[in-house]
Image (tube, coloured by chain):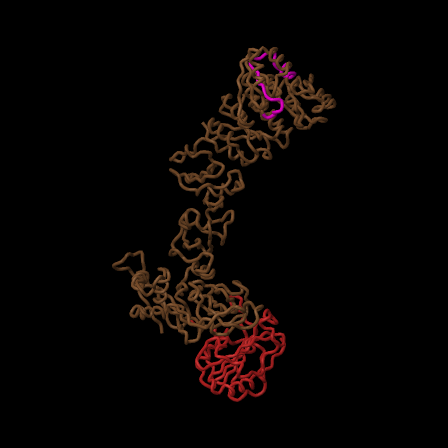
Chain colours: A brown, B red
Amino acid sequence: MTTTLAPDTAATDTGATTTATATPVPATGASTSTTWTERTVESITRRLSSSRLGRRSFLTRAALVGSALAVDPVGFLIRPQSAWAAVCGLENECNQGWSAFCATINDGANTCPSGSYPAGWWKIDNTTFCSGRARYIVDCNRSPGASCSCRCANGDCDRRRVCCNNFRYGQCNTQVRGTTEVVCRIVLCTPPWEWGNCTTTSATSNGTRTHWSSRLPSRTDPTPITVKWLELGLTGSVLGDMASVERDGRRGGTWAVFDNGAMGSRNGSTHYVTGPHGDAYVDRRGAEGPLGYPVRDTSGNPRAVRYDTGSTYRAGNDVWAMDDGIDDYYRNWGEQSGWMGAPTDHAGPLRGPWRAGPTASGWWVVHNTDDGDTRPMRSIEQLDPDGVWPKTAVARRTAGDNRWDTAAAVSQETHPSGADTVFVVGDGRSIHTHAVPAAAARMDAPILFVRQGSIPSETRDEIQRLDPQRIIAVGTGVDINRNVYAQLNDLAPSVDRWADRRRIITAVEVSRGAFPSADDVVLTNDRSHRLAMTSSPLAASLSAPTLITSTSRLLPVVAQEIDRLGANRVTIVGNTSSVSNDVVDDLEARGLDVRRVSGSSDLTTTANVYNLIPSARIVVTEGDAFSNLVSAASLAVRRPLPILLVNENSIPNPTDQKILWRRPDIIKIVGHDRSVSHGVGEALKGYPAL
Amino acid sequence: MDDGAVDDLVEATPDVDVAGDDPPGFAPRPNRGRGVQVDEAGGVVMPVTHVANFALPAALDVFGTQAVETMTAGDNLVALVEYGPAEVDTPLFERQGVPRRLRAADFSPKSLNRTLPDQVGYQEFATEAGRAFCLYVVLAGRQALGRSVQDVNAVLSTLVLEPR
């Protein structure tokens, strides 16, 4: 018998008689967006929903009616009360001898109930449900030691036997001895030997083709999402129950929301995501939103979950989404472990063509959908609705492969045409460099490094390029030994050494050598090399030498140098734990105008020094690297430019706030990426510029 | 769709011989000479021999589900199903030797793949000749159970299983 169902479509899995055509006809009296079958299903579903179905979900009702229409359309429409029989297939009553489906007795879960285990399987060939391939039935038998009693299932139409038939197919879990009762059966499209601990020994029982349960999805034309959900266990799966009907996603796929997550399917790839990532995915409108489709199955709460056009990221107790170009950029820069840190919200649209995702670093990843470009930005306030990128800082790095090379690179930048005078200092955290940058500014000289016992080739080459008339070596023999001093004589007509074994006096020596006189003096603590370096641009801007002092008192030799210079103002850089008020009192007693630039730490003091040096350009370097600090000072005193300190992988808050406030157009980075990382370099490009 | 793959069900070689003359009334349907068959998905089709004292339907599942529907009192069905090498000597198949002599007490109405009125069944997994088997017997009509068991034993006594 062949029954032709017109005007719409239905397919069968009866294995025997009913087929259908798919003859589209114009809809009459109804929306053209729904098919005849859909309208019929909706109508009958409403009819059935009043009392007979109780708490059953809309989805099940739709499945029931859809299946009934497919299996026996004419009979069902005339006698809708037969829907249950059509859905559950032949031999659905207890006295007809077959075992029930697990979904019927296990609250919709297509899984072996507690106290049972997969004990064997058979297949039904050429099924519509599994896209023309075999459908597999796995028996769940009572576990040895568990107990159950024979009964009839009380499904809507699957009233088959539960825990009655003491029979085993025997291809699964053969490590379990003996035969126990079949509790129930589950349904798969995946071969059992790929699904669980079963062998390939195959049995076929096509006589059971129509057997089904109203708690299983419709037996006709299931979607890939339905089949996958089935194989995961339906309501017993990690996803739980389906919470919405499957709906269209972007680019031709579909997706569905479940109690514990979501699943998307496109181009034959069907994957789910559960837990907090699943919530975030649903929050971003799943496959209808910017993330697209999950690219692998994910449970739990991993650091990141991928979708074909984005990712979701764990951020503390939250999960946030980054998409498309924003996510590409974020992934490229190390995600949560990179300089930007974890996202702090979902990426989303802004005015105009902009999309942006915020991160814990304070930076945004900003994507322009007009030009496809993506950039980090410290602020999104300046984004133009017309899509024109706001001006941001240009970050340029001056660095070599090592400390000598970096110093040479700075020298080449500051003195491209050579220099009459060159300062050389020891490269081993010399204690005698405090006063050198200010003097170098005064004498228009670059600063290069030597080893205690040799001149590195990078330094030698740079000195030869500079072709100086004079080299001034600052430091004792501990920093620059006699042999090196002698070698310097081969590189310039004149070589001097300015040094004393006490660093304070070395600074005085440098001041004496470089400054015949000065109105201003910059005074810092003798133990803070970092403050001496970062305050040297201030000294340069004031045409002042840098002198250093102990915390508690001003040595006479320093006071005498201030007198010699004829200075009338002293700028103390550092808080009272660096330079005490006793020192201030002493200076004021000498009739000097004293001001203090300070902060709670070297970092904040440096940031406040910054306020005193007006420039649209700044120099940044890492605050713990001695040689980089010297080279940064050598560069900064030239114009002069303020110096701000960063960490290798982050920008400290005082520095960040000063850059935001100043909005420099050029940021010069001094140091290799081992001291100032690529990430920090990238972040610096994201500052708004004037 | 059809309810197809009947060929896959029963037509494989178990290298099982029911030796000598058939017991009175029994018609064996050994499925020999086809070799091991692998289906599209990679499943290895079970070789099976059905022996019955009634007419077997053309389409017959491994455990004879189509046949049991038609059985009337006095009808007996024996299915000897061979499993694959992976099952040999596993705990489920740890019994050595397919049973040749059954007792009426071995049969139960619960030991059926499909429970039907007035039928009893027997199922046993075993390894013999280095091969894994399941013996499944369905008897219809409890009134003549003793006689049916005798008839089945007569069939089983002729069973010859040789190593591959």
Residue A224, how many percent across, how many down?
A: 44, 59
Say above or below: A478 vs A194: above
Q: Quadrant of the C terminus of chain A?
A: top left
Residue A505, how many percent across, how many down?
A: 66, 17
Observer-nearest of A208 and A345: A345
For the point 53% across and 17% down, the residue is A595
Residue extending furthest right?
A483
Question: Residue B82 occupies which quadrant of the picture?
Answer: bottom right
Say above or below: A61 vs A666: below
Count of numbered circles on the image: 0
Observer-nearest of A430 and A680: A430
Q: Quadrant of the N terminus of chain A?
A: bottom left
Residue B141, how many percent across, how many down?
A: 46, 85
Question: Residue A531 occupies which quadrant of the picture?
Answer: top right
Left-right relation of A654 to A672: left
Question: Residue B98 occupies which quadrant of the picture?
Answer: bottom right
> Is residue A624 part of the magenta span, yes or no?
no
| Residue B4 seen | no
| Residue A101 seen | yes
Left-right relation of A89 to A495: left
For the point 62% across and 28% down, the residue is A626
Say above or below: B135 vs A183: below
Residue A555, how many percent across, how many down?
A: 63, 16
Stretch in magenta: A508-530
> Is residue A529 part of the magenta span, yes or no?
yes
Left-right relation of B51 to A510: left
Residue extending furthest bottom?
B24
Observer-nearest of B85 and A660: A660
